[in-house]
Image: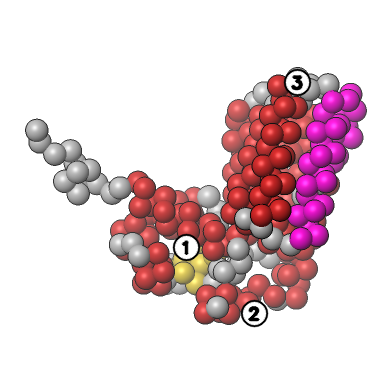
Amino acid sequence: MPQSAAQAGLSPRRDDVDKVIAHLEEDIIFGRLAPGLRLTEDMLMARYDVSRHFVRQALVEMERRGIVRREKNIGATVRSYSQAEVRQIYEVREMLTRHAALMVTLPAADGLIAELRGLQDIYRARAEAGDLRGIHDANDAFHIALFAACGNPYLVRTLQDYMDLTLTMRAKNLADPEGLKLSISQHDLMIELLQGRDVWAFAQLCVDHMQTSKADYLRRVASGADAAGATHAWNG
C-alpha cells in the first residue's frame, strides 16, 4: 500500500506544531517569556527540540491569535501593548462581554449551572494543586461555557479571540494567589447570580471580573516592568 503524504514526510505533522504552540503559551502564562521578548527561531528550536519548519508555523499561528508580533527586519516578539492599546482592547472586550451576558436567559437552565459548578470544581482543584497550566485551561473553559449560554456562536468565537489577544495581560494574574482567590470567588458569585433574575448585576460582574488583570498590566506598562524583565525571563 503506498504511503500517504504525511507518512512520506511530505506534509508537516500537526502535533509538532501544536507542541510548539503549547510550549510557547505555557512559557508566556508562567512568565518565563515576558512581553517584548524577542523570539528567534534558533532559540525556539533549541528550547523545544523541534525543526525550524514547525517553529515558523507555530509563530504564524501565534501571530494570528495576537500573542506574538512579527515585524520585518526585527522578527518575532512576545506581544506587548501600550497603555492606550490595553484600554482600547479592553474597551471592546468589555462591550462584547456585557452584551453576551445580557443575552443569557435568567434564571439559567439547571444544565448550565451543573456544568459551571463542575468546571469551577476543576478550577478550584487546579488552584489548590498549584497547577498553573491547569488553572489557565480551567479558567478559559469556565468562561467559554458561560459565553456559550448567550446562544450566539459567532459572538462566542469573537470573545475567544479577545481572550487570546489578552493572554499576555491576564495570565500573570492567575499565577498570583490573591488574584486567583478573587477570580474563584467571582466565579462562585456568577453562578449564584445565574440562578436569579438580575441580568444587569450578572453582566456587570462579568465586566468587573476582568478589571484586576487589566489594571495590573497597565501598572506594569507604566513602570516598564515587562521590558526590564524580558531578558531576565529568557535567561532565567
Name the residue type under label 3: Asp
Q: Which residue corresponds to mark 1?
A: 70
Q: Earlier in the sequence, mark 2 or mark 1?
A: 1
Which of pointers 2 and 1 indicates the residue nearer the eye?
2
Q: Which residue corresponds to mark 3?
A: 110
Q: Earlier in the sequence, mark 3 or mark 1?
A: 1
Residue in the image at 59% along x and 54% along y: 133
Which one is nearer the viewer's eye here, 79 or 13? 13
131 left or right of 200 in image: left
Q: Quadrant of residue 28?
A: bottom right
Q: Quadrant of the C terminus?
A: bottom right
Are there few (<14), some (14-19), or many (20+) residues within 10 Å of tag 1?
Answer: some
Work out whether 173 lies above or below 41: above
Q: Is residue 47 magenta?
A: no
Q: Quadrant of residue 154?
A: top right
Which one is nearer the viewer's eye here, 146 or 83? 146
Asked whether residue 103 appears in the rendered view, the answer is no
Which one is nearer the viewer's eye here, 77 or 135? 135
Name the residue type under label 1: Arg
Name the secondary structure under disc 3: helix
Asked whether residue 45 appears in the rendered view, the answer is yes
Name the residue type under label 2: Ala
Residue in the image at 35% along x and 46% along y: 14
Alpha carbon separation for disc pair 3 and 1: 45 Å
Alpha carbon separation for disc pair 2 and 1: 20 Å
Q: Determine which of the numbered discs, if any, sits on residue 228 in the image.
A: 2
Colour scheme used in the picture?
secondary structure
Name the secondary structure under disc 2: helix
